[in-house]
Amino acid sequence: MRDNSSRFAVPDEEPVEAAEQPKITDLMSFAAPTQFVDLPSGGKWYPPGHPLHGESSIEIKFMTAKEEDILASQELIKKGVVLDRLIKSIVVDKRVSPDDMLLGDKTAIMYAARISAYGPEYHTKYFCRSCSNAIEHTFDLNEIKPKDQEDLEVEYEDGHFVCTAPVTGVKVALRLLTGKDEKEMAAFLKKKKKNNESMGSLITQMLYIIHSINGVDAKVQIYNFIQNMPFRDSKYIREVYAKISPSMNTQVEVTCNNCYAEQEVELPMSVEFFWPKQ
């Protein structure tokens, strides 16, 4: 475009000074920026002595080329430990282990890390319940917040949540699952499958979340009770656990661009979450 200012009597203006940018003069002293992530647990359910006991947030550093290498490691992906390695790398307090973290808190860290690395836009597919089609959609991860945990309406005794099964009337003490439990459950199911032994994921989860029944904590007896438990009791215990378990609220309202049905869907977790298509 031609500059016509000289053809008109436009007075000279004072040049506007650009905002001064911070100067990095010593690359050796440069450290990755960090952020604080709110923990769904609020630190309430960790035992005394745990580094997250009473901590409502955790400090993590932004993902760097080091974390990109972790996510690109086919060996770590094959072993199923890539996300744990990622969390271990970005958490500032090295006393904190992914194995000892509650699952909901680990999830909150993964969301924050993903947003800091790639932004909040998450493009993937979900299945519409009305037209049964796979619908492409861009989700805003900034909308995913920790689930409200107020008014749990269950007793909390000696580190466990205690409820009463409605049919059998037994006292069931529940424990919150950690990263270590998640690994053990996956290994347990893999072993059962390899040995051609029947063990469903639902029974396995119940076996891990139930600490004791009427004070009995022997796994053999708990397993036998689970297998013979009335469905209503089983459903109630799962509902109680879903309520007490600190987690992210991943229910998202969407409008299908095929049939225009409005619905609430569970945020789908696909490979695009940490490996988005460029």
Image (cartoon, rainbow, N blue to C red):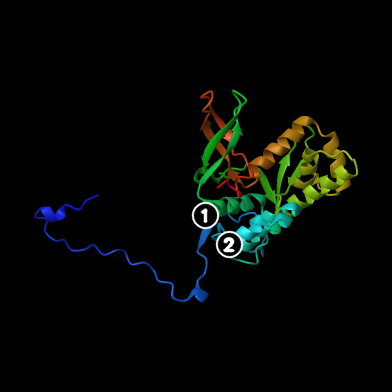
In the rendered image, is residue 28 in sight? yes
Q: Quadrant of residue 249?
A: top right
- The dot on residue 52 is none
Check the image and report above or below for 136 versus 89.
Answer: above
Which residue is found at the position 52% from the left and 32% from the top?
A: 254
Q: Mark 1 sits on what residue?
A: 116
Question: Circle 2 — which element?
Answer: helix
Q: Quadrant of residue 150?
A: top right
In the rendered image, is residue 41 in sight? no
- The dot on residue 65 is 2
* Amino acid on which the number 2 mark rests in the picture: Ala
Compare marks 2 and 1 and give the one earlier in the sequence. 2
Residue projecting furthest to the left: 9
Q: Residues within 10 Å of mark 2 (few under 14, many from 20)?
A: few
* Amino acid on which the number 1 mark rests in the picture: Ser
Number of marks in the image? 2
Which residue is found at the position 68% from the left and 39% from the top?
A: 240
Whole-percent x and y of residue 26? 47, 76
Check the image and report above or below for 135 versus 17.
Answer: above
Whole-percent x and y of residue 158? 72, 54
> Depth check: 245 or 110 in front?
110
Which residue is found at the position 11% from the left and 59% from the top?
A: 11
Q: Residues within 10 Å of mark 1 (few under 14, many from 20)?
A: some
Mark 2 or 1: the one toward you? 2
Question: Circle 1 — which element?
Answer: helix
> Depth check: 7 or 135 in front?
7
Whole-percent x and y of residue 180? 74, 55
